[in-house]
Image (spheres, rainbow, N blue to C red):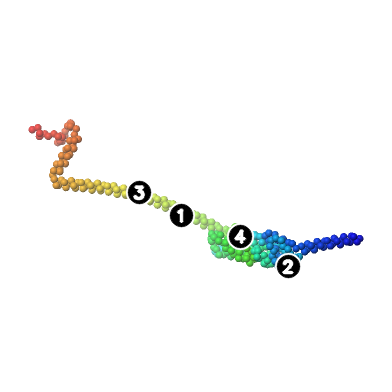
């Protein structure tokens, strides 16, 4: 009986020892991408880095994620400065700042999840940013709008101890009536550009036609000027020749006789010695002197 009592006592001591051992177990670990928030009786006393942490039994460690988190905001709505309603879907990636882990744990989240705060802040920021732009500018300057949203949201999330990693905007849309008006405007602009291009083509072809006609007219004009100049030169030369001949004739009557002799000599050189078979009345017989036979 005493042996059984002793066995039960030893067993109870062993179990109590194990319970005490695990209760006072001083070792804990902080995984990668986390920080360990160490509390003592509910108060934060320190933040442990990744790896092994040794704690007394009256302290408690809770892992706190500092990895990038994602918040999806579907159909955030706003209004432009020209009162056009606009909606967009946003995906915001953020992470808690390492130096703000204790503050975020104490005020906002025990695990690093700030989704609700990010969604609310994103809605407010989107409304504020879109109100600065007209609807056409919101479309034309989308990259700048995204940058403005990023900067404003970063300022907002800094209150919650988080950094914005990046923002994706999608399903950016206005009302159906406004989108129809934009499409109509784009269509009209395309038609206008096509008409302008056609007009420019016609004007270019007309200019080419005029240039060709002017070039041909210039060529004709130059050709006519050349011919006129040549004719004028010939006429001037002939007139000068006649003038010289008349002057010579006026100075001496022998010049005419000389010319007559030259003509007869030229005819004699061309005569083949055959008298004509038919002689018309009054026609001279070459080289026949009828007075010589007397």
What distance separates the C-alpha of mark 1 from that of mark 2? Answer: 79 Å
Q: Nearer the viewer, mark 4 or mark 3?
A: 4
In percent of width and height, residue 280 lies at 16, 34
Q: Secondary structure at mark 1?
A: helix
Mark with earlier residue (1, 3): 1
Q: Is residue 7 left or right of residue 213?
A: right
> Which residue is labeled 4 in the image?
166
Q: How far is mark 1 from mark 3, CA to CA?
A: 30 Å
Which of pointers 4 and 1 indicates the residue nearer the eye?
Answer: 4
What is the x, y in percent for residue 62? 71, 63
Callout 3 secondary element: helix
* First reached walking from the N terminus: tag 2 or tag 3: 2
Q: Return the disc, 4 or 2, that comes first in the chain's sequence.
A: 2
For disc 1, the marked residue is 196
For marks 1 and 2, the one nearer the N-term is 2
The residue that mark 3 highlights is: 216
Give the residue displayed 20% in from the left and 46% down from the top.
Answer: 241
SS state under label 4: strand
- Residues at marks 2 and 3 touching, judged by CB atoms closer than 8 Å: no
Tell me which numbered mark, 4 or 1, is placed earlier along the sequence.
Answer: 4
In three-dimensional space, the C-alpha distance between marks 2 and 3, rounded to whole angstroms, equals 104 Å
Whether residue 127 can be seen here: no
Tag nearer the camera, 1 or 2 = 2
């Amino acid at each position: 009986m005493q042996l059984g009592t002793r066995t039960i006592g030893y067993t109870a001591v062993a179990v109590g020892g194990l319970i005490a051992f695990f209760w006072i177990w001083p070792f804990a670990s902080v995984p990668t991408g986390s920080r360990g928030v160490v509390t003592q009786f509910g108060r934060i006393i320190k933040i442990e880095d990744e790896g092994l942490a040794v704690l007394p039994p009256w302290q408690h460690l809770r892992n706190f994620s500092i990895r990038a988190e994602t918040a999806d905001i579907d159909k955030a709505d706003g209004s432009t400065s020209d009162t056009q309603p606009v909606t967009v879907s946003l995906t915001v990636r953020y992470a808690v700042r390492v130096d703000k882990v204790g503050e975020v744990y104490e005020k906002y989240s025990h695990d690093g999840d700030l989704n609700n705060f990010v969604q609310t802040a994103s809605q407010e920021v989107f409304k504020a940013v879109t109100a600065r732009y007209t609807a056409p500018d919101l479309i034309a300057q989308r990259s700048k709008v995204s940058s403005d949203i990023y900067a404003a949201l970063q300022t907002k999330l800094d209150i919650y101890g988080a950094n914005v990693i990046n923002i994706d905007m999608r399903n950016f849309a206005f009302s159906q009536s406004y989108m129809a008006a934009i499409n109509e405007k784009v269509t009209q602009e395309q038609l206008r550009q096509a008409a302008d291009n056609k007009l420019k083509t016609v004007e270019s072809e007309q200019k080419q036609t005029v240039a060709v006609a002017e070039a041909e007219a210039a060529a004709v004009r130059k050709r006519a000027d050349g011919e006129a100049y040549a004719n004028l030169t010939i006429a001037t030369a002939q007139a000068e020749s006649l003038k010289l001949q008349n002057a010579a004739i006026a100075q001496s009557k022998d010049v005419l006789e000389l010319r007559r002799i030259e003509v007869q000599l030229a005819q004699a050189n061309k005569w083949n010695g055959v008298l004509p078979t038919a002689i018309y009345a009054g026609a001279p017989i070459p080289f026949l002197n009828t007075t010589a036979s007397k």
